[in-house]
Amino acid sequence: MITKDEEHHTSRQESTNTYTKSKNQNQKGVKHMVTVQKWGNSLAVRIPSQFAKNLGVKNGSQIELELLNNEMVIRPVKTKPTLNDLLAQTKGKTNPHLDYEFGVSEGKELI
């Protein structure tokens, strides 16, 4: 989120192609100032690598942009894992249900 004071400060940095500066932001975390650049017919913001790593954002990830109280909020979209993602997490692990003993058959159960 860029406030009007930071926006004014950023506009003075136009001579540099990319400008990134870290500063403490109370107890909420870290702020980065980046320069908005033209990308085709749109404007683009580069996400610092440490931010991307901490948020799990990579090339092709979806993010959500929100205009909130005249500030832009950018947050990653959390996607639900696919069945293949979930199954990939179980590789090499035994299925506890295979070794379960149900007891003596009573009645007409299939054996």
Image (cartoon, helix red, strand yellow):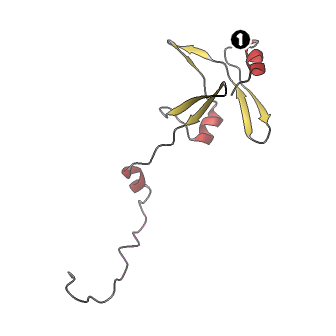
Q: Position of residue 24 (x, y in %)?
A: 79, 35
Look at the image and give the residue range highlighted in magenta: 91-102
Depth check: give the residue in front, 49 or 24.
24
Count of marks, rendered view? 1
Predominant SS along the magenta part: loop
Quarter occupied by residue 66: top right
Left/right placement of residue 78 relative to residue 26 reads left
Who's the residue at 35% across and 74% down the image?
98
Q: Amino acid at mark 1?
A: Glu
**Mark 1 residue element:** loop
* In-image side of 91 versus 26 (left or right): left
Picture coordinates of residue 12, whole percent (x, y): 76, 12
Image: 105 above or below 64:
below
| 92 within the magenta span | yes
Q: Nearer the viewer, residue 2 or 102?
A: 2
Q: Quadrant of the C terminus?
A: bottom left
Report if residue 69 lies within the magenta region: no
